[in-house]
Image: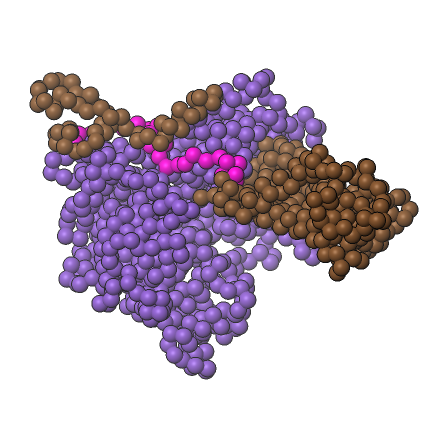
């Protein structure tokens, strides 16, 4: 890491600033319980947190860790069945836990505002965007009529929406996801709050848009001198924005410190595990250090350290008593028995050191086998001029156009693109859920699209399977795991008797790391990661050759992702599977795939070997995508240069673009003039 | 896996994932070389020496997998939720007793429907020890008529309701799931639905006949449409969910997808419709009787109500008994239907 990079942010100065201040908001031993049909759920278990003026505090944790609930206490927006049962929250001389709804109105929105995750649901679809911002302006700034409108237009421009006068009159559906999130932010900052709570503000957005939104929030923070709490599960986002980081687990803050302390010198085993599980720090071809299991059920009483059952460094005392907060530095506290003087010495895992040295490019095992480099490589899937359209006549929409690629036996072929780029459509077309409207698909040299014999159809179904994105939606909630997993067996009569079927189901469950007794349970009893593994077992039981994995980890928590990635890699080795891995996150793709295809607006614009693509990206869209990849090192992340892709740079009016193999196994889409430019860059 | 095994594993899960052994070697402070390593779990800290407290516990991956879930069964939760709704439970007990009583009553009453005869000397006798519900305008015992009519009406209502729900659900599922059938059924629906049903019923009653079975079939034939339309709209909500795509990927037949993936999600709606169809049919039957489209030789609640209409100002008991029973049936099925469909909705299970 260069010294220049280190100067991008001076954490020591910020630490001194924090130490010299009185907290702006101070939460002490907060306990929040929800009652659900007679059962008590303790969502926050005596968590404490200080917030200092002008800082950006990131709260990291998995879903269910209580990060959202905790911050909702600061704005008095707990759901009706929840209440603060213990502790105090001091802000501006007031005790927030005791406020009445009327008193809240003076604080919520005006002093402490909130931006929520989903820009689709936080705006009213029936009112114009201008009206919604102006409403906040009128309510909180007391402006009326023309003055209010002018202020609204000013705010719209401030959040980076060009042509504000025209946009003022438009409805939310006329805005893209990123634009809508800007509007939500505009409403939140309209009343110049002192504290802005951003609850996963970019989770629903594409990486390139995410980077822009983060920049916007940072700029607004400077202009208005706001204090920001950032809730996220994405460590890349944390590295980008945070001065201080609080890590939450099972309703408690288990480690808190300056961002550099948390990233480079963490001391809680959970923080270690979270950081080590990042694919960016993994070595390709090796296992990622995953955290087994799932977070605890907060309906039960938790004894000792909640993380203990999943902790590979757990001490006996972790199962018995809750650890106190130990001080590492004045700004860095950790709740782990490992810091006790009596505890044995444990070194931080190696990947933490790798992060500090900024070796955040995925390492590659030099001996790893890459099927596409094999001189005897066999083509498993071949796609020729594929086109997929939806609708007919005037409503016709071309989702995928003129796509060509080959997938070799035994490789992981990644398809990367933004939402709406057509990557899922291609995946679904390969397993024939979406019929293709043009072109051909071959499996082992045999055509599988269009009319084929019944016998071959069954064979293709068995050889091509799919893993779905959302583990919550992809399992039938009303069927037992037993039925879900054996569905394929039943359809194809792949068993002789009941006993054999059950045995196969149990074997499949064990293979994906689940207990065989799970077969008699219903899907909703499982966590996201477990559900995703059930989905994998369902596909595996057909003994396929080829699996389309459609964003299999994007809906999962950070600690769970590594489990699923490891499982996919294991199965690939053990069974000689071939994957098509669809993703929007390039850091994951680099870890798992042999070759990467980048897709933009239904067309593949570049296709190359994974490392080649990262080192020599040619197409401007690929470059923009790569520049936005989040990096878990705060210094690197904050010094990255964003590139924005503008499709207008291509002039295809005369010189028509072609799909060209510019180097062996490196394809790019462009016209002759562009290809010449690329060749020059590569030194050909 | 055997049932015993399952129960055992559930108990295991509820227990802490650690065993309860203590290393007494160190308690006694006797130096011994081998100390068992494991996830010790003594009752209190005092029983474990400090030295052992700060030793590494053995890591078990399968224990990590076990954390965090509950023991749940769908139908058990449905049943428990239903039982929590006291009015619905009480009314369903009342209804069941009422229905059983329609079969028992001929055994304890002095007259039966088959044996009663017209006797103008006894007309409009108020309820007394001889005629428990009095007599009607032709001097016939009202008690045995009311109970026979109740039985007939309930049988008709259940027959028609079950028939229309089964037909409507099956057709609605296909209508919603198979894209090619959508046009056909939509047009059929529009065609049939645009003419008032009462006209079809009149035509059938006059041209084919008014017997119990014909009218029941006719009612089924014209009532399934509403159910089918309702089911179809719901199927559209579920059709393109990812789990259905997954089933298509596995080559599951349309029939299995409908039966295993979609129908279970519609159960609460279907049960509600079924429950409401029963009082609906009784009301409909009353209307048809009123218009003279039902066979009057077999007493039903509709027929009794129609007869009572002319005399109830002078002899209110003629109306009160059948109307009371109709009310009980209507209220029961309304309450039970709502309670059951709420109970079927997994969002209401914790």
Chain B on-screen colour: brown
Residue A107, compared with residue B144, is above or below; it is below
Q: Quadrant of residue A52?
A: bottom left
Magenta span of residues: B53-79
Q: Residue at x 33, y 48 (%)?
A: A43
Front residue (pair A621, A342): A342
Q: Quadrant of residue B263?
A: top right
Residue B78: within the magenta?
A: yes
Chain that is purple in the image: A
Front residue (pair A165, A446): A165
Residue A600 appears at what percent x and percent y?
52, 50
Front residue (pair B154, A446): B154
Residue B202: within the magenta?
A: no
Residue A101, compared with residue A500, is above or below; it is below
Residue B164 appears at what percent x and percent y?
73, 43
* Screen quadrant of the C terminus of chain A: top left
Q: Residue at x 24, y 66 (%)?
A: A94
Pick out the residue farthest to the right: B207
Residue A446, compared with residue B274, is above or below; it is above
Number of numbered discs overlaid on the protein picture:
0
Q: Is residue A611 visible?
A: no
Residue B176 appears at what percent x and percent y?
68, 45
Question: Going by the image, does B349 lie left or right of A30?
Answer: right
Q: Quadrant of residue B37?
A: top left
Q: How is the image coloured?
A: by chain
Q: Residue at x 34, y 62 (%)?
A: A75
Q: Is residue A514 visible?
A: yes
Front residue (pair A46, A618): A46
Residue B76 appears at what percent x and percent y?
50, 36
Q: Residue at x 28, y 28 (%)?
A: B18
């Amino acid at each position: 890491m260069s010294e220049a990079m280190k100067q991008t942010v001076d954490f020591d100065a910020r630490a001194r600033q924090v130490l010299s201040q009185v907290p702006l908001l101070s939460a002490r031993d907060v306990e929040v319980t929800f009652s659900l049909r007679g059962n008590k759920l303790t969502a926050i278990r005596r968590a404490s947190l200080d917030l200092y003026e002008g800082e950006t505090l990131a709260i990291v944790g998995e879903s269910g860790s209580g990060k959202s609930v905790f911050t909702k206490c600061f704005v008095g927006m707990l759901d009706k069945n929840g209440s603060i049962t213990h502790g105090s929250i001091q802000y501006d001389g007031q005790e927030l836990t005791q406020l009445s709804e009327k008193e809240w109105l003076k604080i919520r929105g005006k002093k402490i505002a909130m931006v929520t995750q989903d820009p689709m649901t936080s705006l009213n679809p029936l009112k114009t965007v201008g009206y919604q911002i102006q409403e906040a302006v009128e309510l909180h700034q007391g402006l009326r009529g023309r003055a209010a409108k002018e202020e609204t237009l000013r705010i719209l421009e401030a959040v980076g929406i060009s042509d504000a006068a025209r946009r003022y009159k438009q409805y939310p559906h006329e805005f893209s996801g990123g634009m809508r999130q800007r509007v939500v932010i505009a409403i939140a900052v309209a009343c110049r709050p002192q504290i802005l709570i951003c609850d996963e503000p970019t989770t629903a957005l594409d990486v390139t848009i995410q980077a822009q939104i983060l920049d916007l929030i940072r700029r607004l923070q400077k202009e208005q001198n706001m204090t920001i709490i950032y809730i996220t599960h994405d460590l890349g986002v944390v590295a980008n924005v945070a001065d201080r980081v609080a890590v939450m687990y099972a309703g408690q803050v288990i480690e808190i410190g300056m961002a550099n302390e948390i990233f480079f010198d963490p001391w809680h085993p959970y923080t270690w595990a979270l950081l080590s599980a990042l694919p960016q720090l993994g070595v390709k071809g090796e296992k990622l250090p995953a955290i087994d299991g799932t977070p605890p059920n907060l309906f039960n009483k938790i004894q000792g350290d909640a993380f203990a059952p999943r902790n590979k460094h757990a001490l006996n005392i972790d199962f018995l008593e809750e650890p106190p907060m130990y001080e590492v530095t004045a700004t860095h506290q950790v709740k782990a028995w490992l810091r006790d003087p009596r505890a044995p010495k444990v070194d931080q895992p190696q990947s933490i050191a790798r992060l500090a040295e900024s070796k955040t490019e995925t390492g590659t095992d030099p001996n790893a086998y890459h099927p596409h480099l094999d001189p005897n490589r066999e083509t498993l899937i071949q796609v020729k001029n594929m086109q997929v359209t939806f609708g007919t006549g005037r409503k016709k929409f071309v989702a995928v156009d003129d796509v060509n690629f080959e997938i070799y036996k035994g490789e992981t072929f990644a398809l990367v693109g933004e939402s709406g780029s057509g990557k899922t459509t291609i995946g679904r077309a390969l397993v024939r859920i979406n019929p293709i409207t043009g072109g051909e698909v071959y499996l082992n040299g045999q055509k599988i699209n269009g009319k084929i014999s019944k016998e071959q159809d069954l064979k293709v179904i068995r050889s091509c399977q799919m893993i779905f994105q959302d583990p919550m939606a992809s399992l039938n909630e009303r069927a037992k795991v037993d039925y879900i997993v054996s569905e394929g067996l039943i359809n194809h009569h792949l068993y002789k008797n009941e006993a054999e079927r059950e045995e196969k189901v149990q074997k499949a469950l064990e293979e994906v790391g689940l207990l065989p007794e799970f077969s008699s349970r219903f899907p909703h009893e499982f966590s996201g990661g477990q559900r995703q593994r059930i989905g994998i077992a369902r596909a595996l039981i057909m003994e396929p050759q080829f699996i389309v994995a459609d964003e299999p980890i994007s809906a999962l928590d950070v600690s769970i992702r590594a489990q699923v990635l490891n499982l996919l890699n294991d199965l690939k080795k053990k069974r000689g599977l071939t994957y098509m891995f669809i993703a929007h996150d390039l850091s994951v793709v680099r870890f798992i795939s042999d070759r990467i295809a980048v897709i933009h607006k239904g067309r593949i614009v570049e296709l190359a070997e994974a490392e080649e693509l990262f080192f020599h990206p040619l197409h401007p869209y690929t470059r923009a995508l790569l520049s936005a990849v989040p990096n878990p090192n705060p210094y690197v992340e904050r010094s990255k240069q964003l590139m924005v892709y503008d499709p207008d740079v291509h002039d295809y009016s005369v010189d028509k673009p072609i799909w060209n193999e510019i180097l062996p196994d490196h394809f790019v889409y462009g016209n002759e003039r562009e290809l010449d430019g690329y060749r020059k860059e590569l030194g050909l | 896996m055997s049932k015993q095994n399952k129960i055992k594993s559930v108990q295991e899960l509820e227990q802490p994932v650690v065993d309860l052994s203590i290393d007494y070697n160190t308690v006694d402070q006797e130096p011994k070389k081998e100390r068992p390593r494991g996830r010790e779990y003594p009752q209190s800290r005092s029983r474990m020496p400090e030295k052992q407290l700060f030793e590494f516990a053995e890591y078990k991956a399968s224990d990590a997998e076990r954390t965090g879930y509950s023991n749940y069964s769908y139908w058990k939760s449905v049943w428990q939720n239903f039982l929590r709704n006291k009015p619905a439970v009480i009314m369903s007990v009342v209804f069941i007793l009422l229905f059983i009583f329609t079969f028992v009553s001929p055994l304890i009453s002095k007259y039966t429907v088959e044996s009663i005869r017209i006797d103008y000397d006894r007309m409009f006798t108020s309820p007394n020890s001889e005629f428990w519900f009095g007599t009607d305008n032709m001097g016939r015992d009202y008690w045995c008529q009311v109970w026979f009519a109740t039985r007939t009406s309930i049988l008709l209502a259940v027959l028609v309701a079950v028939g229309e729900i089964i037909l409507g659900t099956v057709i609605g599922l296909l209508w919603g799931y198979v894209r090619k059938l959508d046009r056909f059924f939509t047009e059929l629906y529009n065609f049939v639905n645009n003419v008032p049903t009462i006209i079809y019923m009149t035509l059938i009653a006059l041209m084919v006949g008014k017997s119990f079975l014909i009218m029941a079939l006719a009612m089924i034939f014209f009532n399934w449409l509403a159910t089918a339309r309702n089911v179809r709209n719901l199927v559209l909500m579920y059709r393109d969910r990812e789990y259905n795509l997954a089933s298509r990927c596995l080559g599951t037949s349309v029939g299995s997808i409908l039966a295993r993936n979609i129908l279970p999600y519609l159960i609460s709606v279907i049960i509600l419709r079924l429950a409401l169809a029963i009082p609906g049919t009784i009301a409909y039957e009353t209307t048809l009787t009123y218009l003279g489209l039902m066979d009057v030789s077999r007493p039903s609640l509709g027929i009794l109500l129609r007869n009572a209409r002319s005399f109830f100002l002078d002899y209110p008991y003629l109306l009160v008994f059948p109307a009371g029973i109709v009310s009980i049936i209507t209220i029961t099925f309304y309450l039970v239907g709502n309670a059951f469909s709420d109970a079927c909705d997994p969002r209401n299970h914790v």
